[in-house]
Amino acid sequence: MVGTDLKAETMKLMEKRTAVEAEMNVIIERLTQPGGPGLSGNLVDSEGFPRTDIDIPVVRAERRRLSELRNDHKEITDKLNENIQVLHSARLAPRSAPANGSGSESSRNIIQRDTPSDMDVDVIVSRPFAVVDEIADGSPAAEDGLQLGDQIVKFGNVESGDDLLQRLSSEAQASQGHALTLVAMRQGALINLTVTPRTWHGRGLLGCHFRIL
């Protein structure tokens, strides 16, 4: 019962996180559209006067809301990580055979297949496929929390396979201006980050380099 309740709670948290990411994406898209103020751009012109081409109170409100959503996203992700670790431990725990001997292998699994929580549990047992070996100061990757040495387990829809560098690049380009979920191992612990590939004064959309493991 506890496992079932925890899995249900985890699935609700995942749905809530998806809703938060969707709202974040809407705000990010508005702020980063051509001629827009950006996520942290200056709200005054070259002469120091308030820009007249944007609605400054609205921009400030949206930036503030985006900051709140990022905090909410982190809290939800932290709780998700706790739940997933518990579900993962339960999944790997030794199990005794059913008393009536009639249980199938699938029915003995605490976590059933094809559920969102299973997908995250599978991520935990997956091997990292890349490591961040370069990251520029002030880059989108650095501002969004990625660190040198982070081992990438999942980058958007990329988890493993061939042509990983090309797929990572394509994933970043396809997600330009949108929040992208990244799962990484940092000092042996699983972490979830949201990075937003975007243009900046340096190279690329993230300002970091991945080395395939």
Image: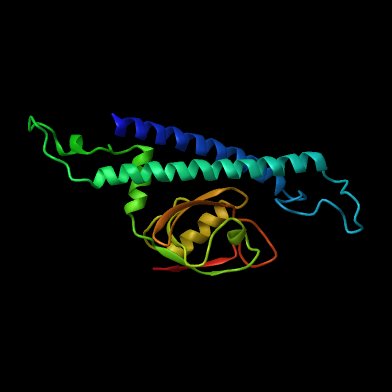
Is 200 positioned to the left or the right of 52 in the image? left
Q: Position of residue 211 (x, y in %)?
A: 45, 69
Number of numbered discs on residues: 0
Question: Would you place residue 7 above or below residue 155 in this image?
Answer: above
Residue 201: horizontal and vertical position, in percent?
70, 65
Residue under the point 76% across and 43% down: 60
Picture layout, residue 133 above or below residue 145: below
Q: Is residue 55 visible?
A: no
Question: Which quadrant of the figure contains the C terminus?
Answer: bottom left
Residue 200, given in percent of the width and then of the height, sits at: 68, 61
| Quarter where residue 58 is shown | top right
Which colour scheme appears in the figure? Answer: rainbow
- In the image, is 98 to the left or to the right of 150? left
Q: Nearer the viewer, residue 202 or 3?
A: 3
Q: Residue at x 50, y 40 (%)?
A: 76
Residue drawn at x 50%, y 34% is 16
In the rendered structure, the answer to whether residue 59 lies left or right of residue 4 reads: right
Residue 198 visible in the displayed image: yes
x then y, percent, for residue 10: 40, 36
Question: Relative to the observer, which residue lies in front, 1 or 32?
Answer: 1
Task: State which quarter of the image contains the N terminus.
Answer: top left
Question: Compared with residue 207, is residue 102 higher up or lower down, i.e. above or below?
Answer: above
